Image (cartoon, rainbow, N blue to C red):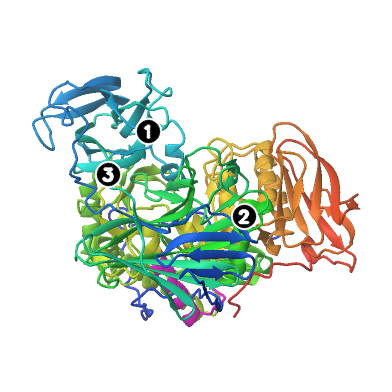
Amino acid sequence: MHRLLSLLVITMLAGCGMLPSPTPAPSPAPTSPPSPAFPSTYLSTVTPSPVPALLPTPLPDGSFRLSTGDGLSLTLSADGQVSGLEIDGVQLVTGSAPALWVRDMSRAADPPVSNLLSNPGFEGEAGWETLMARDAEVAFASDQARSGNRALAVAATGQGMGAVIADPVPVIPGHRYRVSAHFLSRKGYISHPSGSAVFWQRDLYRYPYRATGLYLWWVDATGQRIGEEPELAAALHWHAQVWRRLNREVNAPEGAAAVQVVVAARPDEGDTVWVDDVALIESPEADRPLTGEVTLRGGTLVQRTNLPEAGLAFTVTYTARSGYIAVHTQVADTTGQERALEVAWGAPVSAQGWHWWDSIRESRPITTPMRYFNAVSADFSTWMPMSLYPVTVVEDGARGLALALPLDQPRVALLSYDGGAGRLEGRAFLGTSPQAIHLAPRADFTLNLYRTDPAWGLRSALARLEEFYPEWFDSCLNPDDYAGFEQGDFASQSGVQAVARYDAEGVYTAHYTCADMPVKMDSADGPPPTLDGGWERVAAYAAGDNPLHRAHARAFQVGVAYDADGEPILKHVGVFPWAPDVWEIAWVGNLDPDLPEGYGQYLLTEEVDRAFTQATAVGAQLDGVFMDNFMATPTVDLRPEHIAVADLPLTYSFNDYRPGVHTMSSLAEYLAALRAYLDSRHGADKGISINFWGLATVNFLAPWIDGFGGEGEVQKKPTNWNPAILDYRRAIADHRLQLFSIQEPGLSVADVKAAGERALFYGILLRRGPHGTGWEAGAEEALERYTALVRAYNGRGWEPVTYAHTDHPDVAVERFGSDVFTVHNWGDAPATYTLQVDLAALDLGAPSGVSELTTGEAVSFTIEGGDLLIQDTLESGQTHVFRVLRLEGSHEKPGGQYAEGSSPHHRRTA
């Protein structure tokens, strides 16, 4: 069989495009290729299908009704309140309520309220006691202070941790509180804990990790602490060379009568961390409901609301289309100042007793007055809530209602249901700045409201989103067209020769690029580098003789993102498997192609264009571009030069409440320029593939992506290989190609088989990564077998709605094309179950047979009530793959791939 090589190895050549170690070998100056044409504004080449608007209906009382043509209608009063929301004539609201709300956070960093802590500056021991001092000395020291004369100092004598806890402060359940503090490290950075984007965005807040940061320990009315440990509020992410502010807002939970603030530090051995100016306040900023006159304009309804005392003006536009209602909200600042705003649109849906869907597989009954959401952090430097999925659903078994965020509009937003207020809403975190000269002082976001099939929960919402916008889910990459996949540095002469060889073998080739800004430092045997030393290294390359190194270093200087203190935002410092002999420092980059000499321009000219131009010159065909560490550094960039060229709306930092550019948005601008360049220079059949790291933010970049890679461990630390993450990434990749590189040493045959069974279920192509060393004999062969099995059906494309289910709670189903069903036993024991397939929904007619792919055997079945029934047994962790054969006949391609039913979701053919 052809070798199958993944799109996602991150260790080839210099590894993530790093500036090299000192004294590089001299190289001749390259011939500069012609520069691509960079769009001056965000160019959306993924254009939504035109769908005609359905005209609103004026009602006798001055209100208006919008209808979608499929049984959903929304009624707005003359002043913009939601007075009706119906599905098939069933009213879902119990009374009128404003649809639009705003919460002004522009002055939240310095609010006019009192600090609830008695000794926030550690000017003595009053109000604090030591909670932990493990291999660390905890003191109230005078050698550093941000204000006053003292600060908390935690000095590590080993790999230890120190913490202090404040006296209890009374709180009111349900009220909002903010906790903040400033941190400083003698070394300049903190290296523990460390992890990928999944860790910083999700796992850190769900599991009991020990981190430098702020914690809250709630206390009940009897004075007893709630829980065995305090809850993490915000963790320090690496950089602390200057006083670094951490901040988190929380709602006091039910049962809490008081709270104790915990300040913790986990310095590296020999380092000291200081903490000062801790604050706990009750948040004074309230949600403000907004109303305003609604007028009929053409085929839309427009509501305008002006708040001169707040310096804000709002315009909400409602457009009914076939199947959904688009609600577009724009806010404009009239003061000329920086603004940080929570802007929410929602409907007063009475959903008590309904179900809220967290994912494609899990739901919760709505039974308590809590807020229901499934969020991760959009910022690895603090908690910035963002919905993991771009859609949300509530349903009562008879009807379902969805809110969705359009995938071509990158925004940080939270979709939720407020069980106390009875409100289904989308809340966007928007910023405006006079520095954003491309944007004017405006920001906006859009929500789509539509009905769903309650039987399929969140899956139905995803399927309908694809129905409305099929372009967002298409791809030019059909895995059946290639014998394998390879990525690497193809901009060199040897790289071009490799492309020619791969062409002859039918292997897809993608030129490697990286979203981060890593720099190789000195030998790993030496001491850790300093951050200043890293920038001195970059400056030396920028002034050196090698033109490629000069351009690369200059791109770092221009493109690095800044925090509120004007400091470059750090990703990590360490010695890593991809460069085990040297220290590496990596920073966060802004890839906006409008930045002259910036990192986005560097990637397009010195990497992508050079690789394609050289390949074309020798008659070789490079098939696409690969980006490593995709959205591995989600954060808010506050650098003024970067804000000035932004073409997508700003958000704001949750640590400092300053408006800035989210790295998701700058990457979207780069992808738009990359797609335009590939289309205009080399053809619309050139693919863009990624190493999928980030969560939630990737949703709004997915329309540009043709292949979704991943990597990591599958046994010891399956950060990227657990069911919740696999469900999410399968849903976002949708029909498109998924691959995974196993980067774990010492695996047994059984370990590889366990990973292969999951890969079968999700339709993921596996390979052994370069760090997957020391495997048991036979493990590689087992992996190849699973790869061949997946290739037999994954080109048909994953579908969100399965139209199939089982009668066993541990046995789950996925569907590929219309006739392939993967079934997996997630339980710890064998499971005997019945698979039931809705033949009519899938237009399968009367089947002539059923085959099971892993055994190659025919499977017996029955048909009852138009449904196909298969009785089967699965061992724990086992997957079966069933294909329903049609009466009209079927044939298989060479290599075992199915002839008919391949995925229709491929675009941009040459």
Q: Is residue 37 above or below residue 397?
A: below
Badge 3: how crowded within 10 Å, few (<14), some, or many (20+)? many
Amino acid at circle 3: His
Q: Is residue 721 visible?
A: no
| Quarter of the figure with the N terminus | bottom right
Residue carrying label 2: 400
Residue at the extreme front of the image, as rendered: 60
Q: Is residue 126 left or right of residue 633?
A: left
Q: Earlier in the sequence, mark 1 or mark 3?
A: 1
| Quarter of the figure with the C terminus | bottom right
Chief SS of the magenta region: helix
Q: Earlier in the sequence, mark 2 or mark 3?
A: 3
Residue carrying label 3: 239
| Alpha carbons under labels 2 and 3: distance apart | 45 Å
Which secondary structure, mark 3? Answer: loop
Q: Which residues are magenta?
A: 668-687
Which secondary structure, mark 2? Answer: strand
Badge 1: how crowded within 10 Å, few (<14), some, or many (20+)? some
Say which of 115 and 650 sits in front. 115
Residue carrying label 1: 173
Amino acid at circle 2: Gly
Say which of 887 and 278 sits in front. 278
Q: Earlier in the sequence, mark 1 or mark 2?
A: 1
Q: Is residue 470 visible?
A: yes
